[in-house]
């Protein structure tokens, strides 16, 4: 059982929605399992309004920390300083889930401000394992690692599911499956998205992300961009349903990081995800009841 198994569908926490969130009636069933996710590095501050609004949210809701600057796959020299800041936030806010990306974004001390896929080689796998171990040791708890968006295909020693699963087995971390990233990768590089999901053991999956994407202005559908700037696309919703069928009830997070719409619009998307989760839970309960009847 993962730490966030009690969570339902969540949303990215945006400061412009703070008043809307605080005005939600907590007694309504529809909001009881609502949770919020933040990019951890946005709260590397000593005080001020950011920490204040996160504190206000945390009083009534579960939160998760999603890192974007760990560079687990390379250049781990600054990991101690980085995880020290992450741990301070974890100690203060006690998030239900902590996650990072299975990517690299630093080399020789230079930070590229991007989430770059790793070459799936034995050397890169070991570097990722070293990064995960350092991160988990630094914060004192296990994390989830997220699959990247792929824009180019390249020769590898192993498929991405094998690469990620091996990393989890050798570090004790779990997986955050980003369905939008997977869909983008399938369209850009030709991988079979359903086969990818089928290779992932369900007990490793602790969280799912969905988001919107855009077509490249010049190349159109042949190159999709992980923009988080539009609503979730129909094929991503469909892939989410397939993932929940395989993995069971897993917390689902709707990411939106640009062209931020109204809170009501995001809550409408959240309702769709929550409905899928409720259907998943109902099917699971029905299966348990059937098994109990058979065993009597």
Image (tube, rainbow, N blue to C red):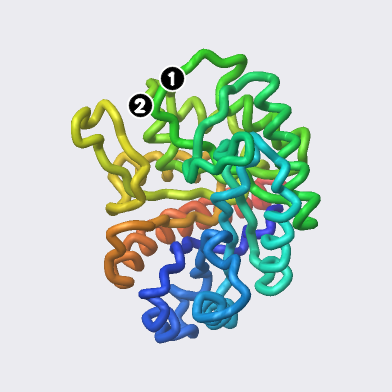
**What residue appears at the point 32 percent right and 50 percent down from the top-left corner?**
232
**What residue appears at the point 53 percent right and 37 percent down from the top-left corner?**
147
Judged left or right of residue 129, residue 118 is: left
Judged left or right of residue 42, residue 296 is: right
Q: Few, some or many C-alpha atoms within 10 Å of disc 2 (few <14, some 14-19, many ≥20)?
A: some
Q: Earlier in the sequence, mark 1 or mark 2?
A: 1
Quarter assignment of residue 285:
bottom right
Image position, residue 268 (x, y; %)? 31, 65
**In the structure shown, which secondary structural element does the residue marked by tag 2 occupy?**
helix
Image position, residue 25 (x, y; %)? 43, 85
Q: Which residue is mark 1?
A: 153
Tell how many labels: 2
Q: Few, some or many C-alpha atoms within 10 Å of disc 1 (few <14, some 14-19, many ≥20)?
A: few
Q: Is residue 195 above or below residue 225?
A: above
**What residue appears at the point 56 percent right and 47 percent down from the top-left corner?**
248
Spatial separation of the CA atoms under disc 1 and disc 2: 8 Å
Which residue is more in the foreground, 52 or 33? 52
Judged left or right of residue 266, residue 36 is: right
Residue 296 appears in view: no
Q: Are circles 1 and 2 on residues that touch, CB within 8 Å?
A: yes
Q: Is residue 1 above or below residue 134?
A: below
**In the structure shown, which secondary structural element does the residue marked by tag 1 occupy?**
loop
Q: Is residue 88 above or below residue 145?
A: below
Q: Which residue is mark 2?
A: 188
Residue most extreme to the front: 109
Judged left or right of residue 237, residue 293 is: right
Image position, residue 85 (x, y; %)? 69, 62
Residue 95 appears in view: yes
Image position, residue 141 (x, y; %)? 76, 55
Quarter assignment of residue 30:
bottom left
């Amino acid at each position: 059982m993962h730490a966030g198994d009690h969570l339902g569908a969540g949303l990215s926490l945006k400061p412009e929605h703070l008043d809307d969130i605080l005005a939600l009636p907590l007694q309504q069933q529809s909001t009881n399992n609502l949770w919020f996710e933040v990019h951890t590095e946005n709260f590397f501050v000593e005080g001020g309004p950011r920490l204040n609004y996160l504190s206000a949210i945390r009083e009534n809701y579960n939160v998760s920390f999603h890192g974007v600057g760990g560079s687990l796959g390379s250049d781990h020299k600054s990991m101690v300083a980085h995880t020290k800041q992450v741990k301070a936030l974890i100690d203060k806010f006690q998030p239900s889930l902590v996650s990072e990306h299975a990517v690299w974004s630093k080399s020789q001390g230079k930070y590229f401000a991007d989430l770059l896929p790793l070459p799936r080689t034995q050397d890169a796998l070991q570097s990722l394992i070293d990064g995960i171990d350092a991160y988990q040791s630094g914060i004192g708890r296990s994390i989830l690692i997220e699959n990247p968006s792929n824009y180019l295909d390249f020769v590898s020693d192993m498929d991405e599911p094998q690469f990620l699963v091996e990393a989890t087995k050798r570090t004790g971390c779990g997986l955050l499956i980003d369905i939008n990233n997977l869909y983008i990768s399938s369209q850009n590089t030709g991988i079979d998205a359903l086969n990818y999901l089928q290779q992932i053991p369900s007990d490793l999956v602790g969280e799912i992300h969905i988001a919107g994407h855009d077509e490249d202005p010049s190349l159109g559908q042949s190159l999709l961009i992980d923009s988080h700037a539009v609503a979730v696309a129909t094929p991503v919703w469909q892939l989410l349903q397939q993932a929940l069928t395989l993995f069971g009830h897993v917390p689902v997070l709707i990411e939106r990081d640009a062209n931020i719409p109204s809170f009501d619009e995001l809550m409408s998307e959240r309702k769709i995800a929550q409905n899928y989760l409720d259907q998943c839970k109902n099917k699971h309960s029905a299966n348990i009841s059937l098994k109990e009847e058979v065993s009597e």
